[in-house]
Each structure stands twice: as structure tokens, then as C-alpha cells.
Amino acid sequence: MHCPECKGKDTKVIDSRLSGEGFSIRRRRVCSRCDFRFSTVEQMEILDLTVVKRDGRRESYNKEKLIKSLKIPLEKRPYREEDFYKLFRDIERDIQKQSGSEITSQQIGEILMKRLKSFDQVAYIRYASVYRSFKDAKTFQKELNRLLKNKKLPLK
């Protein structure tokens, strides 16, 4: 790891601790040349996973695409950044649990919807309406009814 201050190549780890529910490590480092101290974060990464698209195309797993597809339905919704990254890590962990080196985009979509449903129901409905291609308001209403079926509405 190069020093961000002097660009020296020799830095030493002086402290390490788990963060992100144990899925990342925060390391405190010091430069041997200029004594500058800085922190780095090491995170788990899904490697060698191929996503099979609906049309049969195959592409490498891209976590940035997953983050983007999560942020769109959550736009203008209240959530903490740390809660968002916990949601993201949970989704990635679910993806990793799938056996093999390939996963379909449909499987990823279902995992995402399952996690969004408990994270933010409005975001879930937004995502489901696009993912499941709701044709009209009745289809939208059916999904809302399913969502509310087990919820008791407050009395007015």
C-alpha cells in the first residue's frame, strides 16, 4: 500500500479491527518514510461469478450495477447509509450462497426483492413494478394487497 502523503511504498499495519458486521476490516497504517498515518478498509468481494441475462448473454458480476439498481427504488426514501450498505452486504451474501459460478439475473432480482421488502416497502413496490412489468393499476393493487395482507392497519 502506497502512502497517500509521500507516495512511499513501505507502510506498516499498526492496528486492525473488524467492521461492517465482520465482512470488512479497517486497518490503521503508518508510512515508514514520513510517519503519516492513514486508514484503509478491506472488503469481501465476489469474484468469478457470471450473471446470465434473460436473453442468454453472460457478463461478469458487477457490484456497482447492483448498488445502482438498489439506489433507484430507494431514491428520495429515508434511510441511513450504513443501513444501505448492510442491505447490500446481505444481498451479496445471498448471491454467494447460490451454488456454482453462474447466477441468473432473475435469481438476483428475486433476492433483491426479498431483501427490499423488509428494508423499505415503498422501494420494494417501486422495484417490483418494474421487475415484474406491472401492466396496469390493478396489477399494482394486487401486489400492494399481498404486501398489506399480513399487516394490520392502524385504526383512525
Image (cartoon, helix red, strand yellow):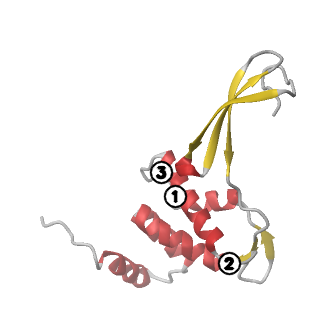
Numbered label attached to residue 83: 3
Task: Tell me which amino acid carries mark 3.
Answer: Asp
Circles 3, 2 touching at the beta carbon (< 8 Å): no
Q: Which residue is mark 2?
A: 99
Query: Label 2 sits on what residue type?
Result: Ser
Secondary structure under tag 3 reads helix
Q: Could you tell me residue 98's position as x and y percent?
A: 64, 76
Asked whether the beta carbons under mark 1 and mark 3 sit within 8 Å of each other, the answer is yes
Check disc 1: other Cα within 10 Å, few if <14, some if 14-19, many if 20+. Answer: some
Name the residue nearer the viewer: 47 or 53.
47
Against 115, residue 26 (above or below) is above
Secondary element at image label 2: loop
- Looking at the picture, which amino acid does disc 1 mark? Leu
Q: Give residue 47's position: percent from left, percent from top.
A: 76, 62
Q: Quadrant of the N terminus?
A: top right
Relative to 5, residue 79 above or below: below
Q: Of the residues under marks 1 and 2, which one precedes in the sequence?
A: 1
Q: Identify the secondary structure beneath mark 1.
A: helix
Residue at point 63%, 58% (across, down): 68
Q: Which residue is mark 1?
A: 87
Q: Residue at x 69, y 59 (%)?
A: 63
Measure the C-alpha gap from mark 3 to mark 2. Answer: 27 Å
How far is mark 1 from mark 3, CA to CA? 6 Å
